[in-house]
Image (tube, helix red, strand yellow):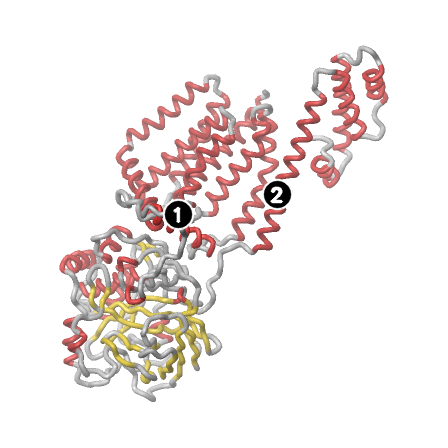
Amino acid sequence: MKQGERFFLSLTNALLLNLGAVGAVLSASSGFGMESGWLPVAMGSGTACLATALLSFGRKRGRWMLLLWGVWATILLVGHTSFREGFCGFVYEVTSDYHVWFANVPVLFMRASREALQFFLGMMASVTALLLAVTVLVWRSFAASLLVTLPGFCLPLVVTQVAADLPLLSVMLFWVLMLFSQFFRRVDPVRAAKTVWMLMPVVLVLLGGLLWVIPHEKKEPPSWALEIQKTVSTWATRAAEGKSPLQLGVTSKVPVFEWTNLEQAGPRVYTGQTMLKVTCTADGTYYLRGEARGDYTGTRWDKPLSDAQLGEVLLWPGMMLAESGSGTTAQMTITSEKDKTNLLYTPYWTFDADGARSTSDGGFARAGRTSWSVQFLPQQSVDFLLLHADTAMYDAYVEENYLALPEDTAQTVGRLAWEAGLSSEMETSWLAQEAVRFVQEDKRYDSQTPYQPENEDFVVYFLTHSQRGYCVHFASAVTVTLRAMGVPARYVNGYLVTVKNGQADVKDENAHAWVEYYEAGVGWIPIEATPGYSQNVLQTNQSQIVSESEPEPPAASAPENPPSQGVSEIGSPAESSPAQPQTETESAEIPRELLTVLLVVFGTMVLGWLRREWILRQRNKRQNQKNSRRASVAVWKQLRRITAKPPQRAKELAEKAVFSRQGLSLQELEEMKTILQQCVRRRRAGSGALRRFVDQWILVLYS
C-alpha cells in the first residue's frame, strides 16, 4: 500500500473512531441531561487519533495496544478519586431516571460534582475509542463496533429519552458508514475508505433532515413516547407483582383531593383533555385561582388546621378583592368540562362571583355547579382591600396558620436562605423576590423529575439534592423559604390561561402552582416561583400588585419558555408556557407524509447501493474465475456494454477464446482486461455528471 493511501485510510479510520466513541458517550450523557463539557470530546478524539496512528503505521499492533491500555490505566490510577466520584454521579443520574418508570430500580449513590462527572465521561470516551480501534482497525467488524457503541445510545431510550442532536447524528452516522463499507473492509480497505467519504454527504443530509424535523427542545415527550412509557411502567409493575405483563390496563389515578400530595410529584403526563372552557369580555393572560393550602407537613400541603376558627371574619376570606366600580370591569364565565374538583376558579381581583361558597380560608366551592360567572378588574391599578378595616383578628389567624413549619425543615431552609444572603430584616416585597431568586438559582426545570425518596422532606430534598423540578417544587420551596424568613406564605394551585378573541379552552397542561405571601394591612400578594414565567402576568395583566414606591426586584435568570406541563395521572398540578397556555399542545411527532417520503428515499438509496455492490461483486467473480474461456467471455460482454465499437484486438481475443481449442493464455486475458479498463476510462471522461451517475448507479457499467 502506498504512503498516500495509508494516510488516507488512517484519516478515514480516525474519523470513524471519533464519530463512534464521542457520539456514544455524549449520547448517554445528554440523554440523561448531564453537562459533559469539552473534556470527553478532547479525550475521546485524542485517543481515537493516537490509536489510529499507532495501529496504522506501527508494525507490532499488539504491543501498541498494550501501551495504550497502560496509559489509560495510569491516568485512571492517578485520578481514581475523581473517576469514582464521577462514576457514582453517572449511576445516580441513570438510576434516578430509571426509578421514574421502574419503581423496583433503586436510586443509587449521590449527585457528583461537574468536574468529576466530566472526568469520568472523558475516561469512558477514551476506553470506547480503544475498543473501537480493535473492532474497526484489527477485527474490521461492524457487529463488534455496534456492540461497543449501542449501550450509550440505548441507555436513555429505555426510558424514552433521546440524546442531543449532534451526539445522535454522530453515532448514527458511524453505524451507517460502517455498515455500508463493511463489504470492502476486509478485501480492499482503501475502497472501503472511499465508500465512507462518498456516502458521508448523502447520509449527513438524510440524518440531519430527519433530526431537523423532530424537535428536540426539552418538551413533553410525544404521545407515542408517553404510550411506551405507560406500557413499560405497567409491565414492570405487573412483573413485580407476579402478574402477567400481557394483562395490560390503565392504572387508576390518585383521587383529585390528593393533588397536593407531594409524594406523588413525579414525572408529568398529560392527556390534552379540556378541563375548563372560558369566555371573557377582556382578552389577556389570567391566573385562575383554585385553592390555597397552608399546612406543610414535609410530604404534602393541607388546609389550615384551624379553618373553623375563621368564622365570619371575612365574607370572602383571604382573597384579594377590589371594590365594585373602582375600574373598568370585565365578566368571565367558566364552565367545567373534565375538572373533577369542587373548586370555583376565579381570576384575581374578582369582586362578585355567582354562587361562590367559602369552604376554607384558601378557596371557594361551586356547590355542584358546572358553570359560573364572575366580575373582576382586568389590567387595572387598584389598591389591595380587605372587606373590613379592622383586620387584627385575621392577622392573628394568618400568623398562626401560615408561618408553621416542621422544626427540621425550618432550621435547614432558614440556614440555606441565610447563607444565600436573605434576611428577615428585608422589606417584605423585596424578600419575596429574593426568595424566588434563591430557589431558582442553580436549579433545573425538569418536567420528568423523578419521585423523591421516601422519608425525605420534599422542599429540603429539592433544594439540597435533586435541584430539579417543575412548578410544584418551585412553588413549595418559595413558600417554605418565606415562612422560614418570618413571612406568612401559602401554596396556591389553579390554571394559567390566555383568553384570545373572548374565549379559551383550558387544557390539563395549563394547570399551575404559584405562591401568595401576606402583608398586614395589604392582603395576600401573588408571586410567580417557577423559572420562565413572567411576573408581569400577575403584576401587570392582573393588576399592579407592588406599589411604585417599592424597589424593583432583580430579574431572575431563567429560560424564557419552559416546557408545557400538564396534570399527571396522579392529578398533581403542573404548568404550561404562559405565552400560549390555552392552545393545543404541539405534537413532536413527525408528519406521516414527510416520514413516508424520508423512509422511501432512504430505503431506495440503500437498496440501490446494495444492488450495485452485488452486481459488481458478481461481475468481478465471473471475470476472475479459473476457467479462462468463461472469464474472457464475461470480459467481452462487459466490453460490448461499455462501447458499441470495441477495439479490433479485443474482438480477436474474444473469437480466439470462443473458437480455439486451447482458449486464451493468462497474458492474453490480462490484455483483454486492460482494453476493458481503457474503454471504461474513455467513456467516463467523455460523459457528463448525469451520464456518469446513470452508468455507475443504474446501468452499473463500472465502479
Give the left or right position of residue 155, taking residue 383 as reference.
right
Q: Residue at the spot x=60%, y=37% of the render?
A: 199
440, above or below 138, in the image = below
**Disc 1 secondary structure class:** loop
Q: Residue at the spot x=84%, y=21% of the render?
A: 651
Q: Residue at the spot x=35%, y=70% of the render?
A: 340
Give the class, few, some or many, for how many residues have Cα within 10 Å of label 2's Cα (few <14, many ≥20): few
> Which residue carries the number 1 mark?
245
* Label 1 or label 2, whichever comes before in sequence order: 1
Q: Amino acid at mark 1?
A: Pro
Q: Amino acid at mark 2?
A: Gly
x%, y% of residue 11? 53, 30
Which residue is nearer to you in this view: 305 or 702?
A: 305
x%, y% of residue 307? 18, 75
Give the left or right position of residue 368, taking residue 702 as reference.
left
643, above or below 88, in the image = above
Q: Is the C terminus in the top left, top right, bottom left or bottom right quadrant?
A: top right
x%, y% of residue 379? 38, 79
Q: CA distance from mark 1 to mark 2?
A: 34 Å
Res. 665 mark: none
> Which residue carries the number 2 mark?
603
**Disc 2 secondary structure class:** helix
